[in-house]
Amino acid sequence: MNEQTERLKNFFADAVGMDAAGRERLIADIRVKDPAVAAELLSLLGAHDRASDFLAPLYPSQSDALPDPRTGTSAGPYRIARLIARGGMGELYQGVRDDGAFDRVVAIKLMRYGMSPAELQRRFALERMTLARFEHPNIARLLDAGTLPDGIPYLVIEYIDGERIDEFCDHGRLTIAGRLHLFLKVCDAVQYAHQNLVVHRDLKPGNILVTSDGVPKLLDFGIAKLLGTDASPGEDDATRTGPAPLTPEYASPEQLRGERVTTSSDVYSLGVLLYKLCTGQKPHDVRGSLPRELSAAMLATDPVRPAARDLLISSADGPDRIRQILSGDLGLIILTALRKEPELRYRSVEQFADDLRRYLDGMPVSARDNTFAYRASRFIRRNAIGVTAAALLFLILVGGLTATIYQARRAEEEKLTTEHINTFLRQILNYTNPRKHLPSDTGHETTMKEMLDDAARHIAAQGGSIKPEIRAELERTLSESYGGLGRYDLMYQHLRIYITLQEGMYGKNDPRSLDALGLWAADLFAQGKMSEAETEFRDLIPRMRTAFQEGNIRAEVLTTALNNFGYLRRTQGDSHEAETAFREVLSLTPAFSPESRFMPGLTKCTLASTLADQGKFDEALRTSRDAVAEYARSGDTTLPDFGFMMTVLGGFLTETGAYDSAGVLLRRAESIFRRSVGPTHLWFGDNIRNQAALFYAEGNYPRALTAADEAIGIYLSSFGPHYDHYPTALMIRGLALNACGRQHEADTLLRMALRLRTESLPKGHPFTSIAQGALGECLASEGKYEEAESLLLTSYRDLTASQGKENPRTLRAAGRLRALYLRWNKPSEALRYGG
Amino acid sequence: MRIVSDREETPDITRLLEEARLGNESALHEIIPLVYDELRRIAAVNLHRSGPAQTMFTTDLVHESFLKLTGSRSLRWESRLHFFNIAASSMRQILVDHARARRSEKRGGRLTRVQLDTSLPVRTESLDDIAALDEAMRELEKTDARAARIVELRFFGGLTNDEIAEILALSARTVKRDWEFARAWLFRNLNEPARS
């Protein structure tokens, strides 16, 4: 189509809707600049007016040419100007107020079907109080109502000069994000109505117009209800049974079944709308000529996954991009709104909108929660070997198998698949046991362990005859594989063999040994030999810096050592030196290979923890939040690294009282861990521990107890009691026991936690103060007030010093003192620690 | 069993439609003659019926051929649309061929077959125009192929604006605008032949 045709078509489309005078003006305007187009337009308009039957006989009439029987007649103070549309319920006209007061353009809706005029009038009288109250920028106002001389009732509505929302999106080629922002405004309006106890019941693109300024306006609020056939006055609006749905494709299953209509029905319709805006299609792959058939088919089928749809929208985001977006969280959000069971949908429009906002902010969404447990368990059952192999692609930051290994292996990432490991093992095992049947894709974790044990025995037996370089590589692979299974004892055993071999080959001063030495130091840390590990790191890190500057080692070798050193120092209680180490890692970010892009995110989160230790709680929260959001934008959100980051942030959020968000993050992280590293991993333990803290904070003590138990079990079996979060897990268990009335058990645990803290940390460290607070709380409930008071006062004083007065941890300590004094019947003392 | 042998004779159009929808060109090439032949067969059957009660719309022809070819097997809606998309072009071809044949019969004076006209799937007077319409549509295609395609889908395929919007990935509003424009354009050109 050439430019002239395009212009002609646009003029034609404009002119078709005009009256004769309007057309004349338009043609006169065009003629000035472009007489040829004007003449063509005139001739086409003439043809148009005579062609309404042309090409018509072959198909059922579509009422394209609308007769206009009411133009010019009056509806109260308004004059009906022209027909805008004809719908199932009646006609919509444009009207003008012409009582001389002022020119106001309105929309006038004639209600042709439904109930008797008397009934409509009666209902309207009941409802106009509610509807007239509606003042919302995204809702078209209902202005008036009345009856025409021939008895047809009409509604007068604010006139919206706009375009249907779906067409607006397509004409503007809006991106998915642009569509979401528009949609969120629609949600605002619906939410507003719900707060006013009005359910829309007929949300669909045709009822949402967008003005040229991009402001969506909802039409027909409450009109579906006005047309209801069964309403009895006084019945609660929010649960009233609705009339037969006006638009089956946008109606909720309960509407289709004629059941109670609640705000949840609008959530569903909004889900259909969002589906349509993102794909151009409706969610159900059904058609029927009768609404009844359509309803039955929709009730019987599930919505098609949005990502699986052919895209029939026009957007600046290309189809591939949109499909990618829809296959992620957004697709899940849409499907959550479209659940057939109202109780599985978002509970409110607000919750739906919040999840979309979280999605737009790059934060994890709650829609994940519904599916993960089921899917994760299925996944793990199906892919036992696959999961353990994937588990090789992680690092345990805390003194464990470290990023160095991860990095060294990253180049071979592709090979680190089940297939690769199987091949590797097969090559070794075939020599010794050719008949052994190696597990195929149906293997299990135990089988994997058996394979590794076989391989380890074989390598040990053949030790002398294998070349040292190859032996070293094999030991390292074994070490990683055991790490992937959560068998840290065997992981370190083989790591030590690797280190010995490396040193034997290259000597201690060769840069090629630095990597192994870093692992050695981390190993000391892992064994709980803190000061030896510290000495090693202090010797090693300057040498690594030099080697890095001379180009002999990669940045990752140095930063891994720095990360582990930082974590060691934090565990030893020196958050400031830890912070320095973490900041050095971040300063080296530009030198990372692309594969290490996850590392800064992890480091930011451990940095956040050290900031929190120093009492910079707000900065800690901000840092970890930014890290999660940044990673969510650019990283692979299925990797355990992301789970670790969300776990850290979830912990902070729990401390600030943001339990909902904390829960979303922690559960999402848990699902990632379950799918990747498995339930014996330290990170998984940290996650469960933070969930235990959340359960405790929410007052769900039995679940807090179970979760704390699980975390303690993981810590002890995979690391040992010197793990710095072990006392924290003991404390949560102790506090939960205390809350369940099991003071005696609680007392023992909390004393153990405090002893571990006091032994390993410098005097006055916040972790010690927190442990004192926990024990003090327990003692207070046992009635041991003096001992409790001494602990709680120390805790409060030290936290005030280390964290500041307004810190959540300090405030919690103050709260404990308050509770103690109230229980002790010393209210004046209690008052000193805040109201 | 008869049904089984029937099935065996008919290639699996359901599968072909799915493949064509997903962009398999060769599947499309397999479907087109199938649809065309079936439509022509059904049209011919109807052309031989007599009496005004038997008058059929093209829409019905297309639907009948659809049911015939796909049986009662369920089919994705997109594939259904794809079928009608193909059928519209075939229908146009069949009707135009028929109209041309009829013209030449008139000229050749083979009066024995005039009886056909009463049972044609379209009104007799409009069949006269079909060949002319086809020519005008070819003209329109030169300046606005999309609008011409919409006419084809709507007039020959019996599809609604909404269905056309789905097939062509346009908004319903755009389809309506194009349709009105094309209708006026064709009407004007057919009534003022000097223009083209």
Image (cartoon, rainbow, N blue to C red):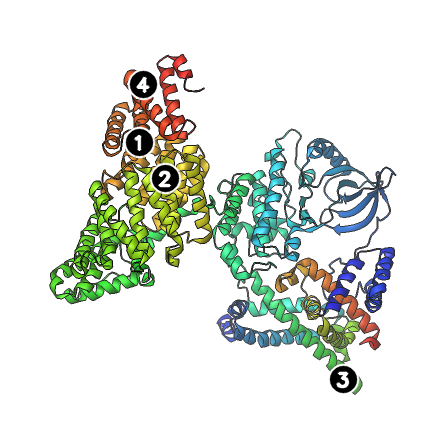
Give the residue at mark 2. Answer: A609
Task: Please state if A232 lies on the left or on the right of A341 as rendered.
Answer: right
A296 versus B94 height, above or below? above
Identify the mark nearer the N-term, 1 or 4.
1
Identify the mark nearer the N-term, 2 or 4.
2
Same subunit, labels 1 and 3: the answer reads no
Taking depth in this image into account, of A707 and A250 the one nearest to the observer is: A707
Q: Is the N terminus of chain A in the top left, top right, bottom left or bottom right quadrant?
A: bottom right
For badge 1, the amino acid type reads His
For badge 4, the amino acid type reads Glu
Give the residue at mark 4. Answer: A789
A294 versus A142 height, above or below? below
Give the residue at mark 3. Answer: B104
Cα separation, mark 2 vs mark 1, equals 14 Å
Task: Please state if A706 lies on the left or on the right of B157 as rendered.
Answer: left
Residue A534 visible, this angle: yes
Same subunit, labels 4 and 3: the answer reads no
Same subunit, labels 3 and 2: the answer reads no
Q: Local crowd at mark 1 within 10 Å, few (<14), some, or many (≥20)?
A: many
Question: Which of the two discs, 2 and 4, sits closer to the camera?
Answer: 2
Give the residue at mark 1. Answer: A765
For mark 4, name the chain: A
